[in-house]
Amino acid sequence: MKGAEVFLLVLVPLLVVVERSECVQCFASFDLTTGECSAELGEVELDDCCQNSQYGYQEEDGSCHSCGVPTWSPWSQWSFCNVLCGEGVKQRRRKCHGLGEPECENSKDTLQTDVCNGTCCNDLGWSSWNPWTPCSVTCEGKGTRMRQRVCSSPPECQSSCVGPAEETQPCEASNKCPVHGGWSSWTAWSGCSGSCIDSNTNVPSRVRQRTCSNPAPSPDTVPHGDPCSGEASERQDCSELPNCPVDGNWGPWLQPGPCSVTCGEGLQLESRRCENPSPKYGGKMCEGASTRSTVCKSPCPVDGFWAGWSNWGECSSTCISPSRDTFRTRHRSCSNPAPSINPPGKRCEGDDSEKTNCNLPHCSVNGNWGPWSAFSQCPVTCGVGLQVSERRCDSPAPNHGGLPCPGESKKNKLCYTQVHCPVNGEWSEWSAWSDCTYAWGGRDIRCLHTGGKQTRNRTCLHQAHNGAICAEGKLTETQVCYNVDKCYLKGSWEGWGPWSFCIPPCGSRSSRRRFRICKPDYSEYSPYIGRQKAPANFHGKPKADCPLIDGEKKYEIENCLNVPPCS
């Protein structure tokens, strides 16, 4: 039991040590002016994100915060006067951004309010309404139409434009909508206009037709319906038909001679030839004998001859693919006439089919991603960074209207250096000047014409993690002075000082004040002190005697009007 108790006592402190900070969305940049984060890195623990004081982080409520030391944002621009005409106020704000304590100096000083006068007393506000737009439907239905107007006021007077900049109203179109023509289906092909192709190459054809009746264009609407585009009939050659037969006719008799042929009918003596013209395409041979003597007979081979080409077939695809050809084919047969079998005739020379490329659009090629690259090196040597891996849409690249690659071309991952970034030092504000005292001991020089000295100090704040120390300046400044605190001096009035801001900066009890300036007479003091003739400074608040005429005041208070309530 004692061993178990010791183990538990050791375990509890270990659990405390490994406690982690909350997870936040980390950003590589924070803008002090807008209070916005940018360049998102990802979700990390707050401690890891804020190892770099230039970073920012976003909490679950969407608010963005700086990882740096508490620092005031610049004052915003003054708002426009909150009244259009007469006396009102304008306001400006600032915000303290930073991590940790202490807060910014004067942490409650986030709002300033000053008096202004509205300059929009004669502002005209809205322009006249523009004309109504056409109805959103042009025939047979209900739609809407719209008109707009413009706020022609300058920016400071925009609030004088009350009401919408745009309005709509229903509208109706009662005219009949045009009906555009559509083709009916094609009729069946007609029969060929002939049964064969004659020697003058007149190829018979067939026809099919369609009508613009599905539907017919409307003639009684405004505008009229559009007629059908394209032709109402289509003609096609009957190229698959055989050639028309040509009957033979005898030529003149030849001189007699040996048997004129080695097969078929031959003559030994006088002969004539069937060549005026020769029979073609199954036409009739010449009638009568070709010789006038003994006939020798043996069967002759019949050589084959091509029939006409068929029509071109359909293309092998509807578009040109990068991986295969797109073509169409036509055929012919060795049947005009066919070669004899016994004795064997010669077959037709050439191919019985023919291919040609189709003139089609290219097939669209959808993009496909190539492989991911290796992740880049971690781009930072301290804090948290972002490594990047990329891929290209080139396997293949999209082409001919194909879709781009879906998804992202980059992916990121966080890298942790486990090293805190250096934090450079920043000078604090100067302290107030110390009391003006005698430089050589404890002598009281108040209200005397004896010079003294005073100092003020500042410190180098926030320097950490081997960051640079504050440069270009001193820790301490010294100046020569006269101590005139609570001393009675003659004075003279120098007019009024400036009005203060409205205090408090919100609510109905806000007011401002100004003071009459009473300038003490230091003419009896030497303007320089010491052997170095350093310019003299006057320390403290003397009791200057500035006489008032009846009815005059040392200060004035004025209520601030139309101040917004405190939120």
Image (cartoon, grey):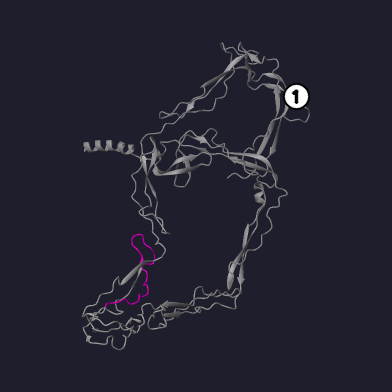
Q: Is residue 25 left or right of residue 88?
A: left
Residue 408 x/y as whole percent: 40, 51
Horizontal relation, residue 231 to residue 367: left or right: right
Residue 172's place in the image compared with 534, above or below, is: below
Category of crowding for the residue at label 1, using alpha-carbon neighbours closer than 10 angstroms: few (below 14), some (14–19), many (at least 20): few
Write down the residue under mark 1. 547
- Quarter of the image for residue 109 reads top right
Magenta part mainly helix, strand or loop? Answer: loop
* Residue 224 in view of the camera: yes
Q: Nearer the viewer, residue 142 or 350?
A: 350
Q: Which residues are magenta?
A: 303-327
Residue in front for this viewpoint, 528 or 129: 129
Picture quadrant where residue 170 is located = bottom right
Front residue of 319 and 301: 301
Q: Is residue 371 magenta?
A: no
Q: Provide residue 333's location: percent of width, then percent of height.
A: 30, 76
Task: Decide: is 144 above or below 66.
Answer: below
Q: Quadrant of the C terminus?
A: top right
Residue type, mark 1 in image:
Pro
Residue 392: image location, x then y, percent: 38, 50
Residue 325 painted magenta: yes
